[in-house]
Amino acid sequence: MKKSVLLFTLVFVFLIAGSFKGNETTNPSIEGTWELQSFYNYDGENVIDTIKKSDGYRQVKMYSKEKIMWTRYVPDDPNGRFGYGSYRVTDNTLIEVIEYGDDNMMKALDTMRNFTFELILKEDTFSQITVDSDGNRTFSENYKRID
């Protein structure tokens, strides 16, 4: 009888202790594979226009622990687009440093290699928002996790 009471008491204590664990919050990670869903235009702060991607247009970004690779397919453009580099995420900022890419990307890299965005990251979506020199939101790419 004592063993039954002891066993019941231990089970009860473990159940009660487990209920005080609280809500564990986990920060979403950008690691994974993402596909572009839409674009937003801003008035400086608020979204004023949503642009869906055109039929056949695909843009995918893949983030590993420290590296990024993205690719874009546009049906009317015979040349694909891609870029590869490193990235880092801080509180609400995504910084991509592109090392190399397709011919058009390499030409663009002559003038700019570092891309800094405001980042809104959730578990299965993220938006990278371009901000002007005054800190006003201008444009965003909006992605959905696909892996």
Image (cartoon, helix red, strand yellow):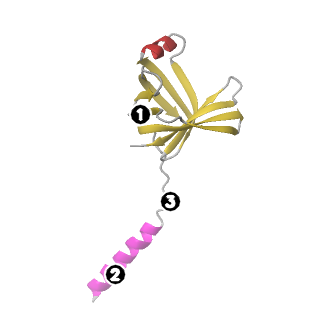
Residue, disc 3 = 23
Of marks 3 and 1, which one's residue comes earlier in the chain? 3
Q: Residue shown at 42%/67% (left/top)?
A: 18
Q: Is residue 105 one of those drawn in magenta?
A: no
Q: Please state if 45 lies on the left or on the right of 23 as rendered.
A: right
Q: Quadrant of residue 93?
A: top right
* Residue named by callout 2: 8
Residue span colored magenta: 2-19
Q: In the rendered view of the protein, which quadrant contains the N terminus?
A: bottom left
Q: Position of residue 76 (x, y in %)?
A: 48, 25
**In the picture provided, is 93 more to the left or to the right than 70?**
right
In this view, 53 is above or below 24: above
Question: Who is closer to the viewer here, 75 or 9?
Answer: 75
Frontmost of labels 2 and 1 is: 1
Q: Earlier in the sequence, mark 2 or mark 1?
A: 2
Along the polypeptide, which appears first: circle 3 or circle 2?
2
Marks 2 and 1, how far apart in space? 49 Å
| Residue 49 coordinates in the image, percent (x, y) | 67, 38
The residues bearing labels 3 and 2 have C-alpha atoms spaced at a distance of 26 Å
x 45%, y 42%: residue: 29
Q: Mark 1 is on which residue type? A: Tyr
- Residue 73 at least partly seen: yes
Indicate the secondary structure of the residue bearing disc 1: strand
Residue at the far front in the pictured view = 76
Per the image, label 3 sits on a secondary structure element best described as loop
Is residue 11 part of the magenta span, yes or no?
yes
Q: Nearer the viewer, mark 3 or mark 2?
A: 3
